[in-house]
Amino acid sequence: MIKTSNEMSIKSLARVTKTTRNLEKPRPLKLSNLNRHTTFDGSSVRLNSVEEIMHLIDMVSGSIANGNIEQGLQPNIINMCSNLKAYGQQLETIYKDQLDRAFVNFRNGCREEQLDVVSRLHLLEIIELRAMQWQCKDTDSYYKQKLYQLE
């Protein structure tokens, strides 16, 4: 019995499709050296994934853009600032466009007189840090001194 080329190509196609498998959505990246720990004021919460940090950034950015400036925003800004100091460079490579949009809102938020001075100072710090490609040089000591003066 002689097989036609059409029959052979169907069998080879069936063999190829059997070997493929469904791809699963990748898990969120885990940041190294992170342990989740909180204080009572929520200011030192370390998040476990870049997605959680980006969610926090989006939440703060959206609140500032919509004018929802309230007392509960300050701990979120402080938390976001500490996470951006540690992982801003990693986030920049993955979420550059999203960070661009958020930082426009952060710059506008620095001009909002409704936003407390401490929050505005933290926003200025991360704006400057990003402008220097996340290389913390003299800014850290400068902003620590300013925060100390405010207390």
Image (tube, helix red, strand yellow):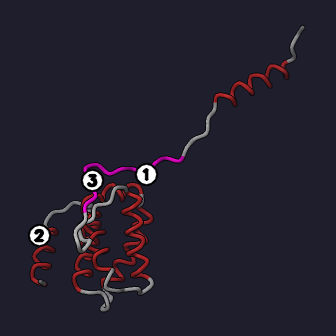
Counting residues from the N terminus, which is met first, the one under dot 3 or under dot 2?
A: 3
> Residue 26: within the magenta?
yes
| Amino acid tagged 3 | Leu
Describe residue 52's horizontal placement relative to residue 71 as left or right. Answer: right
The Cα–Cα distance between marks 2 and 1, rounded to whole angstroms, is 33 Å
Residue at the image point whose x is 28% and y is 79% from the top: 74
The residues colored magenta run: 25-37
* Residue 119: quarter of image: bottom left
Where is 17 relative to 130, above or below? above
> Which secondary structure, mark 2?
helix
Give the residue pinned by disc 2: 141
In this rendered view, identify the residue nearer to me: 54 or 90. Answer: 54
Foreground tag (3 vs 2): 3
> Residue 138: within the magenta?
no
The Cα–Cα distance between marks 3 and 2, rounded to whole angstroms, is 23 Å
Residue at the image point whose x is 53% and y is 47% from the top: 25
Give the residue pinned by disc 3: 34
Foreground tag (2 vs 1): 1
Q: Quadrant of the N terminus?
A: top right
**Image coordinates for residue 148, horizontal then vertical, percent:** 10, 79
In the picture as drawn, the residue positioned furthest to the top comes out as 1
Q: Quadrant of the C terminus?
A: bottom left
Counting residues from the N terminus, which is met first, the one under dot 2 or under dot 1?
A: 1
Describe residue 143's horizontal placement relative to residue 124 as left or right. Answer: left
* Residue 11: quarter of image: top right
